[in-house]
Amino acid sequence: MKLDEFKIGQSFRTKSFKVTKEEIVKFAGEFDPQYMHVNEEKAKEGRFKGIIASGIHTLAISFKLWVEEEKYGEDVIAGTEMNHIKFLKAVFPGDELYTIVKVLEKKQNRSATGILTVLLSTYNDKEEEVFEGELSVLIKQ
């Protein structure tokens, strides 16, 4: 979709994604190797009583789910900004996540491009919000 096709307030719901312990440990081992993500024994002694996903992993899953909806398609040029990132609740192995994407703002930039800002709100299968963040992209008009 081009910038002009998106409407302020419009929202989309993505498909679901089931998070596994193996994916949590693999992602964190490479990008966020803190004990609560990679060391099951130590994580059991911590606040969450077990392994949890890295917040950055949750953000990545949220973005993946949105991109797979193919609303940007080949009209997107590049990401430009992320703001108000909030990790609201821990994500555990076995959680199924989905994202609600709401169009917040559209700005014409140049004659053929503009900036689209959306709010990603990600929920688990208990309908608890686990992540929220604004994403802006440069997109064709």
Image: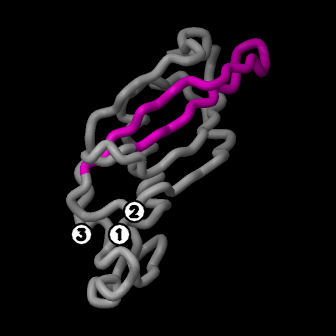
Q: CA distance from mark 3 to mark 1?
A: 11 Å
* Residue 43 image point, x, y percent: 34, 83
* Residue 68 image point, x, y percent: 36, 34
Circle nearer the viewer, 3 or 2:
2
Q: Earlier in the sequence, mark 1 or mark 2?
A: 1
Q: How many marks?
A: 3
Count residues near mark 3 (Cα–Cα under 10 Å), then give few for <14, some for 14-19, many for 20+.
Answer: few
What residue sits right under mark 3 in the picture? 22
The amino acid type, in three-letter code, at marker 3 is: Glu
What residue sits right under mark 1 in the picture? 52
Q: For mark 2, give the secondary structure.
A: loop
* Residue 125 image point, x, y percent: 25, 46
**101 and 1: which is toward the camera:** 101
Q: For mark 1, give the secondary structure.
A: loop
What's drawn in magenta, residue-wise? 96-122
What residue sits right under mark 2 in the picture? 90
Q: Which mark is residue 41?
A: none
Q: Do the residues under discs 1 and 2 have CB atoms within 8 angstroms?
A: yes
In the displayed structure, 100 sits above or below 4; it is below
Secondary structure character of the magenta stretch overall: strand
